[in-house]
Image (tube, rainbow, N blue to C red):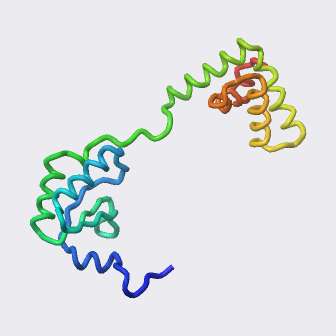
Amino acid sequence: MGRRKGEDSIASRKRRMPFVAKIRRDDPFRPEDEREIEAMCRRIAGADEFMSLAGWREDAGFRVFHFPTWAKARTMQHWIDRSGIAHQPMPKLGETAEERVEQQHEALAWGLSTGAARAIVQAYRQARQRGEGELTAFNAAADAALALGRALDRVNDTARADRLVREGHA
């Protein structure tokens, strides 16, 4: 998909805003850090414009902020260096190993206390014996867990029948 001739392209915006400030960072920022950076860019730019891009080629590994004047770019670079925003921790992505283990233990305890573990493992094994794939067998185990009264948000943890089988509970 191409751009129309009259549209404001990134290249034309770069020509209008040749002065840059850079943050060296490959990892994503937390949402609150993103908001802080955006607010500072708006504050520094004032009524003028600015542009933020991921760096590439010689700027790979940087987040690059384009401003129309040297003073604004220098002010932004000074804030970046002074605030330490580049060294903020990365956002938590997904569950930690400890959280997964805790969920598995809770699912196993539920299956054993209610007697549902056997039915869930049997649903999984029967699907595999019918020649079904791993995902289809997992879905059969999840359906069995749901039918046996497991909360919908906990079904996936409970349906991991391979964990129950390895533990020797079926």
Q: How many marks?
A: 0
Q: Position of residue 101 (x, y in %)?
A: 56, 25
The quadrant in which residue 30 appears is top left
Asked whether 76 or 41 is in front, the reply is: 41
The single residue placed furthest to the bottom in the displayed view is 5
Above or below: residue 18 compared with residue 152: below
What is the quadrant of the C terminus in the image?
top right
User: 86 left or right of 95?
Assistant: left
For this orientation, the residue located farthest to the left is: 71
Q: Residue at x 11, y 69 (%)?
A: 70
Question: Residue drawn at (72%, 14%), measured in percent from left and top?
Answer: 112
- Residue farthest along the front direction in this orientation: 47
Q: Residue at x 76, y 41 (%)?
A: 134
Left or right, 153 with respect to 72, comes to: right
- Residue 148 on image: x %, y %: 77, 23
Front residue of 135 and 40: 40
Q: In percent of the image, x 68 and y 27: which residue is there?
A: 158
Left or right of 29? Residue 122 is right
Closer-to-camera residue (56/115): 115
Residue 107 at x, y percent in the picture: 65, 22
Task: Examine the rendered structure and indicate whether residue 157 appears above or below residue 23.
Answer: above
Farthest-out residue, top: 113
Closest to the observer, 148 or 123: 148
Q: Quadrant of residue 41?
A: bottom left
Q: Residue 165, image x and y in percent?
A: 75, 24
